Image (cartoon, grey):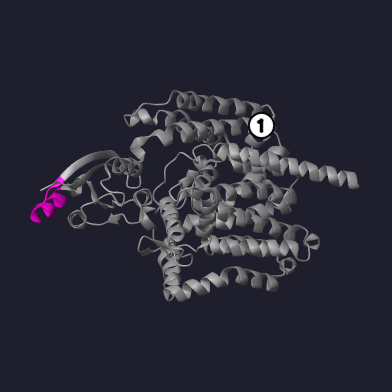
Amino acid sequence: MTTAVGAAAAGGVRTYGVLVLLCLALFLPGLFTIPPIDRDEARFAQATRQMLDSGEFVDIRFQDEPRHRKPVGIYWLQACSVALFADRHTDIWAYRLPSVAGAVLAVLLTAWAGRRLFDADTALLGAVMLAGCVLLGVEARHAKTDAVLLACIVAAQAVLARAWLTPERIGRWGEPLAFWGALGIGILVKGPIAPLVVAATAAVLVAVERRARWLLALRPAAGLAVVLAIVAPWLVAIGLETGGAFFESSVGGDLLAKVFDGQESHGAPPGYYLVAFWATFWPFSLLAALAVPWVWRRRRDPAVTFCLAWILPTWLAFELVATKLPHYVLPTFPAIALLTAAALRAAPVAALAGGWRRIPLAAAAAAWLAVTLVLGPGVAVLPWALGEPASAGAIVLGVSAPVAGVLALRLLWRGRTAAAVAGLVATALLVYVSACAFVFPRLDALWVGRQAAEAVAAVRPCPETTVAATGYEEPSLVFLLGTETRLGPPAAAARHLLDDRCALALVEQDQDPAFRTALTQAGAAPEPLATVTGINYSRGRTVELHLYGLAER
């Protein structure tokens, strides 16, 4: 007995070690070389940078503007990461490390939850699928909240699954403390999202079984005290610091606005996430679709019921919310991965496919292949489309991706599930290396802020030079040029040049006439120093920026 337990524990440790290595292989390409991404990543990183520079770790600001849409947790994690690992506060990779850690932890916790819901092999397969999917790969490379939030949600859901399936096996304090601690940290990272996902899951389970006593195993009275101990100190501090403005902005200005209105042009009709799923859960989206009939037939099995309770209320809620971004449904992906893995292990893929009619199945396969061609060869030749040289390595890897994917699906059809999933992971790795290591870091047209920072560094007249930008005011510009960067109208940029002989002005083409007019009226003239061209991908248009100093009179 003791030997068996020890062997099982050793096997579990090896499994988690393999998952960590797999995650690092999937998440690290591009982490150190892709510049700051507009807009969310650059805003989070700049606000964290200001915390480090100022020593103010309660109030969150982007330059002088209060940033009260999200709680402080991710900023503290990023600040610790930069302080521990980076030599400079402009090393964006250091701000991304908490997201990498959150993504890796989410994968490990998915394996942990899967062992409780299904079995060790299904758990491993589901965790591998989560690790390889596009959406988690994107969030792992993004210095913002969602990968860390996912880890908190999966930790809480794993304990909730134990309480639902075998409440008598829940420890007296260890697992309940982990549950409430995960919720508390989740609140500090992204407000009410983690509790809402977990509460929705529990509510569906209670409604299905018409029993709620199993929730008592989580020790809710003591648990709420744990949550308050985690979140209350900062909530009180930020409330006093801002006179309550934080709560007005985060709840009224962010959460409720997203529910009832599509913020920042991110509105979309219901069904958006089902369409996006073919790309966000790629390369496993086709497998998930094949699993749907099996899942429906087994919906009354306790483990399947739990996963459906995890997925459906959260997914439907975000489909109904006005503001839509692909990462909003990420909290459901661990359960989707586990259900897909369970279906693949329970039945041959031919039997799963038999649950679909021919035309929908052909359409699903076509959608998967289209996404594969876009992410593989399509991204590899993107530099050509933008007038830049393409990388031979990217093209080789990008073209290899659909070939590897099709071969993996053939293995799946032949019943070699593990080999097929490994092949799909290899397909994803080919795409990630091609796109994130070869294409995106070298694609100058996308990184207008990086080009501008390089141009400023080449002509900077004084060590303390500050830049006034007009027309192009993306957050990455502030992160790369410094907190003292001035953003404003053309007249303000002209006045900055007039008031500071060490200053420079970065002027977007459309604002150039007004900028020159303001200088002329003051009896001065601009001196052209450099021109930057590229694509403002946040707005979907090309830009041309002119860097000016003040001409000698």
Give the secondary structure at mark 1. helix
Q: Is residue 499 or residue 376 the one in the foreground?
A: 499
Is 553 magenta? The answer is no
Amino acid residing under circle 1: Ala
| Circle count | 1
Q: Is residue 326 or residue 185 the one in the foreground?
A: 185
Relative to 14, say whether 299 is above or below.
below
Left/right placement of residue 349 relative to residue 242 reads: right
Relative to 502, say whether 228 is above or below.
below
Density class for disc 1 (Cα within 10 Å; few <14, some 14-19, many ≥20) is: few
Mark 1 lies on residue: 350
- Looking at the image, which residue is at 47% across and 48% down? 326
Question: What secondary structure is the magenta-colored segment mainly?
Answer: helix
Left/right placement of residue 526 relative to residue 338 reads: left
Relative to 392, say whether 344 is above or below.
below
Residue 221 in percent (x, y) is at 69, 74
Residue 343 visible in the snapshot: no
Residue 345 visible in the snapshot: yes
Q: Which residues are magenta?
A: 513-526
Residue 391 in percent (x, y) is at 42, 26
Relative to 375, say whether 193 is above or below.
below
